[in-house]
Image (cartoon, rainbow, N blue to C red):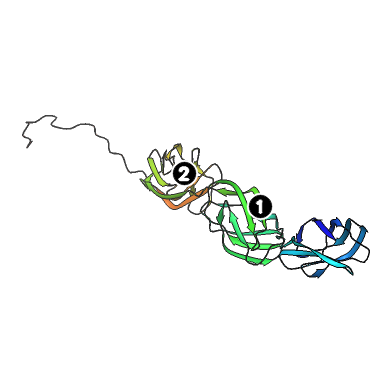
Amino acid sequence: MVITSITPNSASVSGMVYATITGANFVVGTKVTIGGEAAYNVNVEDSTKITLIVPPNTPGVKDVVVYNAYGSVTLKGGFQYYVEQSRPAIHEVIPAEGSAAGGEPITIKGENFMSGARVLIGGRDASGVVVKSTTEITAITPPGTPGTCNVMVINPDGGKAVWSAQFKYISSPAIESVTPSRGPVSGGVFVEIKGRNFESEARVYFVRESGGGEPVYLENAKVISDTIIKAKVPASPDGATGYMDLVVENPDGGRAVLKRAFLYRTTNTEPVIYTITPNRGPVHGGT
């Protein structure tokens, strides 16, 4: 007998796939083993072809042996078993957006998740990953760059799932100071706001410390850089005194609040000079 080939020449360790052996001088009653395990449903179709079902086995390269009452022939290393990678899938990420500063909890819904899986968001490893079941993972987002990015789950066996460009990082502005931090209820004071991650076209406004009332937008607000905004304080609504919280809101919804950032106070009495008498004197003073 002669073995020329086996097709296919590989399968997962679970086996149970159809294969065909080609060669010569096969006879009815011939048996087949792959890696020492007997093949199933062996059928000698003619003297040059045998069909069979591949048996389960351990990973690695295996010999294929064809034998009968007249002898045996071996195809050394003719078949390879491999461990098939898992096929996880991501169906949903809740919530689907978060701060670019990271540190926020998310839940990933899907299937075929394995214990020990990694979660990457925008290419960075999430922390606190807990595989609660084959269909649910919880994690803490890493810092990221504003915009959309991929979420990836990688099982320990290398099987991976990608949720493409559907998670959105929102900018994370922060306000550090407002100078000056107080002014008259009539407004008109120019202030400089310092912080970080300010974006062009950011909205700048006051809200009452108590949280009531409508936003009071600063006038002529201009983002000088990602760390400085300059603006003019408007008159206090209804001429009321008291502290106002300052809000900087980027176009993508990223929001920063500085509590008690500005104090509206009663306008000081403005003195008026009518005359000065005498209206002249010596250069050395003393008048």
Mark 1 highlights which residue? Answer: 162
Where residue 89 sits: x, y (%)?
71, 56
Q: Nearer the viewer, residue 51 or 253?
A: 51
Q: Is residue 22 left or right of residue 274?
A: right
Label of residue 214 in the image: none
Residue position for label 2 = 198
* Relative vertical location of residue 165 with respect to residue 105 in this rendering, above or below: above
| Quarter occupied by the C terminus | top left
Q: Nearer the viewer, mark 1 or mark 2?
A: 1
Query: Could you tell me the amino acid type at mark 1?
Result: Val
- State whether residue 50 is above or below residue 224: below
Pick the front one: 59 or 67: 67
Name the residue nearer the viewer: 87 or 242: 87
Disc 1 is placed on an element classified as strand
192 left or right of 41 in image: left
Is any atom of residue 195 visible in this view? yes
Residue at left offset 63%, top offset 54%: 152
Disc 1 or 2, which lies upstream in sequence? 1
